[in-house]
Amino acid sequence: MIHNPSMIAYYIYKMTILPNDLYEGIYIGQHKIGSKDPSCDNYKGSGSDWKKYILKNKIPVKKEILRLCNNLEESNYWEKYYIDQAKQNGEHLWNILEGGRNHDPWRKYTKEELREKNKIRCKEWYLENKERNCENGRRNRKLHKEQYAETRRAYEERNKDRIKAYHKNYYEQNKERHSLKAKEYYEKHKERILEKSREYNKIYAETHKEVLRDKARKYNDSHKEEHKKYKSQLCCYEGKEMTLNALSLKFLRKGIDNPTQKAKEYLIEN
């Protein structure tokens, strides 16, 4: 292909990632340069993943001019051709789209149509590249974990008062709504919540026996007089006279929550 400098020109380029421990692969694209020499053009590509992971992290790359084109139609054709060739050769491509579309063909759509098309395209691309995206995300989190944490800590420290005021204001504005939602959720999942609570209480009682015994001892020592008053009283339950301890034990065997408290309430009422 002979390049005609007098015409508005495009060129097809290939960016190759130089050997490193993080990334590999190539990116193929087209760029409009007019009549200037493409070898002097510093353009390095505009793919979303390519910019996010390669250019932003300053990964070393090598640029190669594949072809010069005299118009957009020609440029679109050859961009798609080289991308297809790379796919057939099994190369690791960073291109999301199939190429040959540039930006002009999209101008015939309205904003709403473009938005819907982008949603579908992004969803398809995500499903096709899910594994690679997850791997890239995990790799970047490991690489920049400390940096992200430090940046967040610094931001929270600088804006401590503003963040606190925001949360307080948000809570006040949405207090009733959150309270209502919490009640609705509890009513909807009451049985499951109570069952989980019982399971948790059993596990906690097994793993904190000594702590609970010490607390019970201290409580009993500080409430001796009150206990004597209750223990001396008798109540009639299911046709039998019972003390507080006997009634509490009865409630416990029936699976009633807080048996001691329920026994006290029953004793006071009767």
Image (spheres, grey):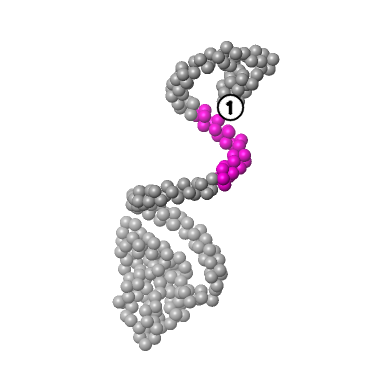
Q: Secondary structure at mark 1?
A: loop
Q: Is residue 180 magenta?
A: yes
* Residue extent of the magenta highlight: 176-203
Q: Residue furthest right?
A: 239
Q: Is residue 185 visible?
A: no
Quarter residue 40 falls in: bottom left
Q: Where does residue 7 sit, x and y in percent of width and height?
A: 39, 86
150 to 55, vertically: above or below: above
Q: Nearer the viewer, residue 50 or 1?
A: 50
Quarter residue 229 falls in: top right
Q: Is residue 171 visible?
A: yes
Q: Nearer the viewer, residue 223 or 65?
A: 223
Q: Nearer the viewer, residue 207 or 61?
A: 207
Q: Is residue 33 magenta?
A: no
Which residue does the image show at 48% across and 26% down from the upper left?
A: 206
The quadrant of the picture occupied by the N terminus is bottom left
Q: For this view, does 218 lie left or right of residue 174?
A: left
Which residue does the image show at 33% across and 71% down from the upper left?
A: 63
74 to 183, vertically: above or below: below
Which residue does the image show at 43% across and 49% down from the upper left?
A: 165
Q: For this view, does 231 lie left or right of residue 65?
A: right
What residue does disc 1 label?
257
Which residue does the image show at 41% across and 51% down from the upper left?
A: 162
Considering the whole magenta stretch, tell me its main secondary structure: helix
Q: Where does residue 191 sit, x and y in percent of width and height?
A: 61, 35
* Label total for image: 1
Dot 1 crowding, Cα within 10 Å, few <14, some 14–19, many 20+: few
